[in-house]
């Protein structure tokens, strides 16, 4: 592919998960010699990561445009499509059902790629287009990280953003599982890292949990990527009792850091958290409550078992050495299926198989007709 045949459009300057997705996708494409341009999509009040500022381009003139965003944002993005470019959507969505009013905008794109088996399995049922599975890249170290020494306590980490839907992230279950697993133990701790404005009054509840239990610490502020990595490095266990995840970047990053990962056995995390690599938690299907997620009427998701999550935490507490084989297996799986080099090669293969590399060098593109919003 000629230089700058591909432009990647995303929140390159944001600290949110989608920002890291954009940066990792750029790294994956670059690792395979695709020479992408990084086009930043502004996100007011959420641009606290400047690690890519030197790599940004203001010129988005390219033959192929890869757009990374949440599903509901593609209504706006579909109005910005370039008729001379092959436009690819890389949408994120946490439910099995895809609302028609949002899918019609997604289908204006020439190509659709899915970041996880979960997204791919369900998204393909709502479009006649071919949905290519291109799993989310993960920054995986070449060497296995050493286990964090357990000097005086088992340290458990849970983090979420109030702006990413409180009910979906489900911190209440995390607190309940921690207390059920360790009702009186003093050699354990739970750190909950949060931020965001849309707390729906639940921030006071969260702070109250820490006030009632000295083993629980709340960090309520925006941290840099470096600070987040340092925070993760201090802990032994990463817990995510989500009701759904499109991919589950927090769990993937924790696994890549060599941590024990306790996660709901549902959603995008099932690509890499299994009985061999982590500690999946049983769940029951429940309806999505009104207001718990956007455009969710008639949808369902997982309700993780607090009791089983507590058993998983005790399993790690009682036999931490026995869990090391799982983390090593997880690192191996991530290297095989999610490393930036692997994903870059797969990205190039999709473009080649679709004839996009050759077409990018020849005549440009005529995008499919759109229809009124």
Image (cartoon, grey):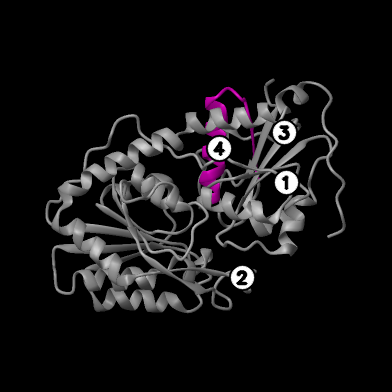
User: x and y percent of residue 126 in the render?
Assistant: 69, 56
**Residue drawn at 84 percent across, 43 percent down:** 368
How many labels were placed on the picture?
Answer: 4
Labels 4 and 3: the sequence-earlier one: 4
Q: Assess whether mark 1 and mark 2 are in contact (beta carbons under 8 angstroms).
A: no
Labels 2 and 3: the sequence-earlier one: 3
User: x and y percent of residue 332 in the render?
Assistant: 34, 35
Q: Which residues fall within the magenta stretch?
A: 18-40
Q: How many neighbours does mark 1 have within 10 angstroms: few (below 14), some (14-19), or many (20 or more)?
A: few
In three-dimensional space, the C-alpha distance between marks 2 and 1, rounded to whole angstroms, equals 23 Å
- Magenta span: chief secondary structure: helix
Q: Which residue is mark 2?
A: 296
In three-dimensional space, the C-alpha distance between marks 2 and 4, rounded to whole angstroms, equals 28 Å
Q: How many neighbours does mark 2 have within 10 angstroms: few (below 14), some (14-19), or many (20 or more)?
A: some
In three-dimensional space, the C-alpha distance between marks 3 and 1, rounded to whole angstroms, equals 17 Å
User: In the image, which is nearer the foreground, mark 2 or mark 1?
Assistant: 1
Q: Which residue is mark 3?
A: 64
Instruction: Say the numbered circle drawn on residue 129.
Output: 1
In three-dimensional space, the C-alpha distance between marks 2 and 3, rounded to whole angstroms, equals 32 Å
Q: Which residue is mark 4?
A: 25
Labels 2 and 4: the sequence-earlier one: 4
**Residue drawn at 48 percent across, 53 percent down:** 268
């Amino acid at each position: 592919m000629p230089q700058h045949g591909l432009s990647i459009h995303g929140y390159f300057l944001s600290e949110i998960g989608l920002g890291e997705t954009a940066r990792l996708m750029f790294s994956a494409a670059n690792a395979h010699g695709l020479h992408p341009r990084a086009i930043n999509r502004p996100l007011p009040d959420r641009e606290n990561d400047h690690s890519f500022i030197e790599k940004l381009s203001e010129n988005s003139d390219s033959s192929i445009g890869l757009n990374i965003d949440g599903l509901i944002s593609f209504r706006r993005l579909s109005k910005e499509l370039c008729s001379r470019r092959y436009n690819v959507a890389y949408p994120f969505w946490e439910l099995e059902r895809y609302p028609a009013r949002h899918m019609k905008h997604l289908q204006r794109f020439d190509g659709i790629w899915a970041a996880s088996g979960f997204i791919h399995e369900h998204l393909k049922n709502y479009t006649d287009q071919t949905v290519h599975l291109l799993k989310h890249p993960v920054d995986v170290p070449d060497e296995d990280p050493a286990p964090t020494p357990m000097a005086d306590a088992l340290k458990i980490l849970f983090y979420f953003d109030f702006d990413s839907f409180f009910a979906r992230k489900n911190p209440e279950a995390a607190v309940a599982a921690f207390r059920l697993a360790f009702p009186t133990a003093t050699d354990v701790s739970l750190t909950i890292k949060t931020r965001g404005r849309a707390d729906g009054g639940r921030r006071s509840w969260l702070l109250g949990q820490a006030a009632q239990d000295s083993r629980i610490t709340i960090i309520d502020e925006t941290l840099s990527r470096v600070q987040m990595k340092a925070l993760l490095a201090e802990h032994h266990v990463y817990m995510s009792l989500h009701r759904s995840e499109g991919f589950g970047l927090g769990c993937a990053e924790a696994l890549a850091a060599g941590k024990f990962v306790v996660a709901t056995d549902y959603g995008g995390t099932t690509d890499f958290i299994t009985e061999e690599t982590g500690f999946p938690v049983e769940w029951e299907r429940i309806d999505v409550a009104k207001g718990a997620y956007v455009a969710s009427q008639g949808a369902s998701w997982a309700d993780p078992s607090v009791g089983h999550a507590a058993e998983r935490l005790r399993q790690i507490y009682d036999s931490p050495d026995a869990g090391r084989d799982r983390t090593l297996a997880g690192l191996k799986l991530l290297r095989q299926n999610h490393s930036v080099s692997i994903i870059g090669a797969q990205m190039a293969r999709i473009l080649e198989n679709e004839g996009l590399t050759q077409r990018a060098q020849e005549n440009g593109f005529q995008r499919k007709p759109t229809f009124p919003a």
